[in-house]
Image (cartoon, rainbow, N blue to C red):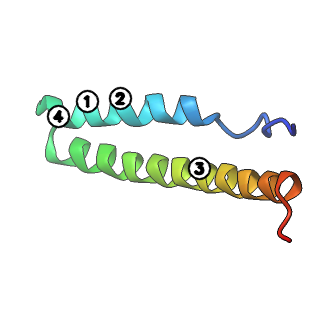
């Protein structure tokens, strides 16, 4: 299996950052500017997570094609 590019964060690392952003927002102790910056950061992280998941799903589809070729 191909290794992930070392310059891009792993899904699990991104998920931890996203969870931390959500916790900061839910704490309610942020200024409006801090909350907006945290929200913006969270949406960018969520998009990265989604892209990684879509790549993984595509790899699974490709592997299934090899194992279960269409007749």
Task: Residue at 35% x, 29% y: name it.
Answer: 20
Question: Is disc 1 in contact with disc 2, using a CB cutoff of under 8 Å?
Answer: yes
Question: Is disc 4 in contact with disc 1, using a CB cutoff of under 8 Å?
Answer: yes
Disc sitting over residue 53 in the figure: 3
Name the secondary structure under disc 3: helix
Compare marks 2 and 4 and give the one earlier in the sequence.
Answer: 2
Task: Residue at 59% x, 36% y: name it.
Answer: 11
Disc sitting over residue 20 in the figure: 2
The residues tagged by marks 2 and 4 sit, at their Cα atoms, a distance apart of: 10 Å
- For disc 4, the marked residue is 26
- Name the spot of residue 8 as percent of width and height, x first: 70, 40
Disc sitting over residue 49 in the figure: none
- Name the spot of residue 29 as percent of width and height, x first: 12, 30
Compared across the picture, whether 37 is left or right of 69 comes to: left
Which of the two marks, 3 or 2, is nearer to us in this view?
A: 3
Name the secondary structure under disc 4: helix
Name the secondary structure under disc 1: helix
- Name the spot of residue 1 as percent of width and height, x first: 87, 37
């Amino acid at each position: 299996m191909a290794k992930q590019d070392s310059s891009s964060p792993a899904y699990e690392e991104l998920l931890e950052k996203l969870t931390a952003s959500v916790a900061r927002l839910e704490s309610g102790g942020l200024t409006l500017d801090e909350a907006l910056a945290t929200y913006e950061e969270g949406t960018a992280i969520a998009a990265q997570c989604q892209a990684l998941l879509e790549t993984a799903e595509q790899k699974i589809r490709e592997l299934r094609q090899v194992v279960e070729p269409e007749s």
